Image (tube, rainbow, N blue to C red):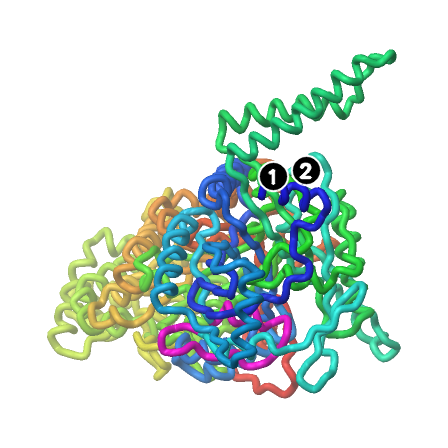
Amino acid sequence: MKLFKGIARFLGVEGDRSAPPPRYVALADGLIVTETHAEAWFVLSGSNTDLMSESARDAEHDQASSALARTLSGYDCHLKVLWAPLNSNEYRDEAESLFSAGDYAAWAETRIDRLDDLELPTRLLLLGVRLVERSTQAKARGSRGVQDAMGIGSTSVAPKELARLDALTRRLGRQLETTPWKAQPATVEMLAWMIAREQRRGAPLPTPDGDGTITGAKLAQLTRGRVLPYPDHLRIVDQRGETSAWTAVLTMDGFPEEMESPGAGEWLRAIAEITYVPEYTDDDLDRDIHVKPVNAEPSVRFRVLHKRDALKQIDEVRRLAKEQRQSAAKHSAGETAQEIEETEETMTALSRDMKREDVTLLEDHPRLIVSSDVSLEDLRNRCDAVIGFYGGLGIEVSVAAEEQRELWLESQPGDMLRVPDLVHTRTVGAFAGSWFWGGASVGDDSGPIIGYLTGSTPGVVRNDLTGGSERGDATTSAFIGRSGRGKTTAMMLSLLDSGFRGSFVLALDFKGDMGGLVSAGRRYGLNAHLIETGSQFAGVADLFTLLSGESAERAQTEVPAQLGIALPQHLRMRGAETPIQSAVNEAIAEGDPATWKVIERLRKSDDELSREAGDALYELSLTGLGAPFMGRPSGTTLITPSPGIWVVQVPGITLPSPDDGRDDWSVHQRLSVALVHSLLAYGISMAGRKDLRGLRKVVAVPEVHVLTATREGSSFLQYIARVGRALHTALVVDTQDPESLASLTGLVEQMTTVFGFQLTTAEQQDAMAALLDLPKGDHTRQLIQAIGVDVTQEIRHGHCIMRDRRFSSATVQFDVPSLEILELLNTTPKTQTVAPVPSTSEPEGVNA
């Protein structure tokens, strides 16, 4: 038998080119069963390699090589990389479980329209492993012919056999689950989609039976489409007899002797980078010319050789090279070809490495499936783009002539190797170096969509500011970068998503440019309020009002402390804090307390010191900074701990540094600290209230360096960060200074997500690299320097590096779903309005 196989391989007829298409018998979770054999199929997870450090890449590469050499040794495997169009309508259904407040349906619809414009595909990695042989091709053909002739054909599989195959699949799956691919058995629905997608595009897929399998007529309908082979392509024919798609199979004929990774050696990961320019008609000349992805789909059948078989092959090649060298030495010239000597040396070194390390050989048969649903000319343009791209890497690719049918069938799941001619033998390390599972991947698995990846693989990016508590994880997110790069707009988009999730959102706007958040919230029906400093908002930050419910007792100590901060230094030195505490106690005992009532009580006191303190506080309450926390209310809506968005604008405040003595504070600084004291005390009490534990809460602090300059501010930030998980409170910070942020250990330790925008100084870039979990060095500095500009060196708003809760980092583009929303969220001073703006035009997607 071995002699026959050797002769067949030598003659190029080892594969059965004439074998009929696979006849599927049953599909189940992780299983494809045909008449001749059964295969286990797994979905592989992609790994984020674009920004991975060199040491991390080496470690993951070694793990993948070991998995190939140990777990898959001796198996016939089939690797497929598929591209599925993003079904944006699924986000409409998802919105029902994600959002609950405001007109969330309209908000989700705006995002859906934008996703339709982007046309982002989703990469799917699937691995098939042949488990057992059920019968030979000859036996299957004979049995099928007899059964069909007698009318007793059957495609059922005994439950006992299915149970045995399921056990084998799960056993192999447990081993593959621990690899870098984190393999999981493919669902029966995905397997049905994979089989049907090339033959009946758009046809409804069958539903599994009660036992979770697809058999019989349901299974037969998956392959009822017609495929017409031509010399250089195939045509997919729909139910009406019309061509619905054109497909070509390309073979990879030759590889360089050596390939570097990162670099040309990543020939499978790089498939996502191939683009082309479609043909445009005269009617399209007025439109922008877009470069589109080719989305070629690799299909690689491979077999990892047992080490003993691999060593035997290496020894045969080494022995043959040695014989050729010795034979050449006997001739008069006495010279040996350099290639023969190199081959002998290489085989000797490879044999030594295989005996010492976990290395073996692998035989693979790579094919590239290129499809188009536009035209045959479009298909050929795509094929030319693929050939040209790989030609630049030194890899020979060509359209398979006269064997399109055989190669297309070979690429189908459940089929077999039909064309063994173009086999490549390489080490498992070389195959792992293709990084078929590599690319860009970052963000949450579920939650609101905030933008899209800009790395080597496309896809949407999700992030939920409020999801940390539900996962039992930290709850702090940071937006870091220089001014004018879109970080505040990006933060406001995420806060809007939190508002639609039914969260209480409190934004402390120290710069005064977040009024658009309220405008956008009101536009989509959210409970949104803008609160500013000034007499028109007198009493809005009164601690007696803010500290309600179980936090009311704190007001008895917090209000005197706040008034003591605002009090002139000479009165405080005379002991005015004591009559202030007395007035607070009396106001509480009287009922319905308020800070302005405390001041009036002081002014009417018989004690001279009390009257002086009351008069001084009264005059300060008439100022723009004093009115919000101790002025007489003017009827403005107060902050209430209920679902909605509250933006508190306090521009122009001046907080002292931690080194400034209290005696040196100016009046402006005293009032600034007192006002911030109200907001921080409210934030802490609101987060800690037991009756609000079930309410999602978000505290957002743009320009966080304003708070980090004070002891009270730093303590507040670190407290919210540390207790956020337990209190269901998310902290969101925005800063231009990562160095000062990095000094807050309690805050940095609790960061679950970091968005890094452009920075230009080496010190700040190194601080950013540490927060993004990227290696410090010139390469990372250049990356951070370039992240905020496009190819023309113009500003690219909303482009950043995202580090997610898994400590993966990738480049991300925040995406504003429409021009209307971009105008509402505009942070320039001329657009500070809170009036809702009705939509009067068709929305267009733009970047943040």
Q: CA distance from mark 2 to mark 1?
A: 8 Å
Q: Kindly identify the amino acid type of the residue bearing the numbered disc 2.
A: Met
Q: Quadrant of residue 125?
A: bottom right
- Asked if residue 206 can be seen in this view, the reply is yes
> Which portion, as a residue range, is magenta?
189-213
Up-down relation of residue 763 to residue 97 (above or below): above
Where is mark 2, residue-wise?
A: 259
- Asked if residue 509 can be seen in this view, the reply is no
Where is mark 1, residue-wise?
A: 430
Q: List x then y, in percent, for residue 33.
A: 48, 65
Is residue 643 rendered magenta in the image? no
Up-down relation of residue 448 to residue 327 (above or below): below
Q: List x then y, in percent, for residue 285.
A: 85, 74
At horizontal 80% and vertical 12% (from top left) the residue drawn is 330
Q: List x then y, in percent, for residue 245.
A: 72, 74
Give the SS element for disc 1: helix
* Quarter that holds the N terminus: top right
**In the rendered view, does 536 fall on the left or right side of 128?**
left
User: Is the C-beta separation of discs 2 and 1 under 8 Å?
Assistant: yes
Q: Kindly identify the amino acid type of the residue bearing the numbered disc 1.
A: Ala
**Lower sequence index among marks 2 and 1:** 2
